[in-house]
Image (cartoon, helix red, strand yellow):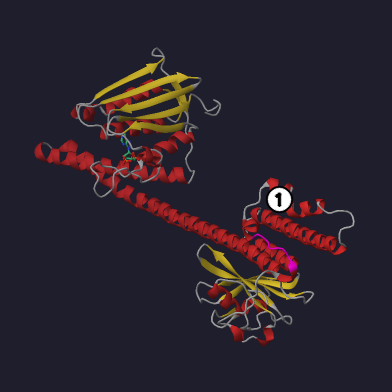
């Protein structure tokens, strides 16, 4: 009896037999499970060393039975090589697809062929009920099989899973753990192996009825175990892929809900805000003294609110690809001069030093682009540079024309950005400081909008920075839409 054989009535102390079945050499299970390289595939590294020496040492007239024994050994090895070849092919096939159904079909087919059995099935533990359900079987999972759920207690599959080791039963009909899982034909013998994923067992692979009724061998156990290990990995990968795809679907759904909310909210907020802005402007022009100052505060707050709503609308347009540049020819130099003028008051109040340099300096630096959007890009960068630079710091804007592209740099001597954050600051709503304790105002939308606006012009944006020293935001824009890709 093989060491895996486990009779129900002899469950506590399974009878064990030393060595392997019928003179077959041991298979190195490690080798079966180890990854196969191309070189392995071309030529199997089966060590024939001793036998070759023995063959070479044979003298003419050596005993016939010695030759016969060697021939038998070689025959066994050849068979093993062909198993290995088949297992390698199975792993190659398994590596070529991630979809679970064909993978399990391949494993079931290979298991029946290589163990010389009539059928094979793979049962997995149902996470909800804790019972075993058919995932694949020879001939497919029929409606009848689908209905079957096998308890872990007192079943052959459950026994394999609980013990985490193979189980071989020569005559199932006499075994109380047999639940008649394979309904369509008479089951005589079963070999079950656990499907292990790391430390846990997720199911069981069973091969049923040795075709020639010779009984299962040690080789069969090892082949089934190897294929079971492949099945377990394939199932785990497919499950992970499923979970990932589901997570993406959930994310897309949440994103859609957010987009719809932003769309409705911005629309609903815009109308009353326009009324507030209209009345506040009218009243401010018509009242004097303290009331006028208070109205100025109301007006400024309303303008800030409008700019936040504009950000939300812009972001939604970028995300839904509803935005296209409305191109005109304009001077980049003039645009930057306008922006610096707009920020001059706050720059002065923070005692910042703002400088700019244009190359070539005698050109208007014309660009064929959407003026409003490019204005937003540079204004956002300058606004951030002002916001994140302490009083007395410096900001420099550099514009250079090179190979029909404008290289624009907005450089500050501010707080800087840690390396890990440099990609993420371009994500929507992302801010380096935690939102609840942050010192700086903003919603974390400016840079994602800026990036979107740059990209619809087929440009690029990135940042270089040293924490505590400052940041350099670089934008490259084509001078016209027909300029080759950047
Ligand atoms: P907001 O400024 O409204 O928070 P942004 O999308 O414009 O949103 O910027 C995202 C984050 O990137 C900021 O919260 C800040 O942490 C960081 N950041 C942007 N510009 C600078 C800069 N010039 N210096 C330092 N940090 C910056």
- Who is closer to the viewer here, 439 or 282? 439
Residue shown at 38%/26% (left/top)?
409
Judged from this view, the residue extending furthest toward the right is: 61
Residue 388: x and y, percent? Answer: 27, 35
Residue 35 visible to an observer of this rendering: yes
Front residue of 126/411: it is 126
Task: Classify mark 1: helix, strand or loop.
Answer: loop
Q: Position of residue 406 (x, y in %)?
A: 45, 23
Most frequent secondary structure within the magenta stretch: loop
Q: Residue at x 83, y 54 (%)?
A: 58
**Ligand 1 shows up in which quadrant of the image?**
top left
- The residue closer to the viewer here, 214 or 467, is 214
Is 24 within the magenta? yes
Residue position marked by numbered label 1 in the rendering: 45
Q: Residue at x 69, y 49 (%)?
A: 40
21 up-or-down from 62: above or below: below
Please say if 357 is above or below 147. above
All told, the count of numbered labels is 1
The question of residue 82 being in magenta is answered with no
């Amino acid at each position: 009896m093989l060491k895996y054989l486990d009779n129900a009535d002899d469950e506590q102390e399974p009878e064990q037999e030393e060595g392997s079945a019928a003179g077959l050499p041991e298979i190195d299970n490690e080798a079966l499970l180890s990854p196969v390289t191309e070189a392995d595939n071309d030529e199997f590294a089966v060590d024939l060393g001793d036998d070759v020496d023995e063959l070479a040492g044979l003298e003419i007239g050596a005993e016939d039975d010695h030759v016969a024994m060697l021939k038998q050994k070689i025959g066994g090895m050849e068979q093993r090589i062909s198993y290995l070849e088949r297992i390698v092919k199975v792993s190659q096939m398994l590596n070529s697809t991630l979809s679970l159904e064909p993978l399990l079909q391949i494993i079931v087919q290979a298991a029946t062929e290589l163990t010389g059995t009539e059928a094979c099935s793979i049962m997995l533990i149902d996470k909800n009920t804790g019972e075993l359900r058919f995932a694949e079987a020879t001939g497919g999972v029929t409606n009848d099989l689908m209905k079957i759920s096998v308890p872990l207690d007192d079943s052959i599959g459950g026994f394999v899973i609980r013990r985490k080791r193979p189980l071989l039963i020569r005559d199932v009909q006499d075994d109380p753990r047999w639940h008649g899982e394979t309904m369509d034909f008479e089951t005589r013998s079963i070999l079950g192996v656990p499907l292990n994923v790391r430390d846990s067992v997720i199911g069981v692979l069973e091969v049923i009825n040795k075709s020639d009724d010779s009984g299962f061998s040690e080789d069969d156990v090892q082949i089934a175990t190897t294929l079971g290990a492949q099945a377990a990995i394939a199932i785990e990968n497919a499950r992970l892929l499923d979970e990932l795809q589901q997570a993406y679907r959930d994310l897309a759904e949440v994103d859609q809900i957010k987009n719809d909310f932003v769309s409705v909210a911005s629309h609903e907020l815009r109308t009353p805000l326009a009324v507030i802005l209209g009345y506040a402007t009218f009243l401010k022009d018509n009242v004097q003294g303290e009331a006028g100052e208070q109205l100025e505060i109301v007006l400024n707050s309303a303008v800030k609110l409008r700019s936040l709503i504009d950000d939300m609308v812009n972001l939604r347009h970028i995300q839904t690809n509803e935005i296209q540049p409305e191109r005109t020819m304009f001077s980049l130099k003039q645009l930057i001069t306008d922006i610096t003028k707009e920020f001059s008051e706050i720059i002065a109040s923070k005692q910042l030093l703002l400088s700019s340099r244009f190359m070539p300096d005698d050109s208007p630096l014309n660009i064929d682009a959407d003026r409003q959007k490019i204005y937003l890009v540079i204004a956002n960068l300058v606004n951030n540079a002002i916001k994140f630079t302490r009083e007395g710091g410096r900001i420099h804007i550099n514009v250079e024309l090179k190979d029909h592209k404008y290289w624009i740099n907005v450089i500050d001597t501010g707080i800087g950005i840690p390396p890990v954050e440099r990609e993420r600051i371009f994500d929507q709503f992302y801010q380096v400081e935690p939102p609840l304790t942050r010192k700086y105002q903003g919603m974390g939308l400016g840079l994602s909008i800026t990036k979107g606006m740059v990209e619809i012009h087929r440009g690029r944006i990135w940042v270089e920075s040293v924490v505590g020293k400052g940041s350099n935001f670089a934008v490259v824009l084509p001078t016209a839409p027909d300029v080759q890709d950047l």
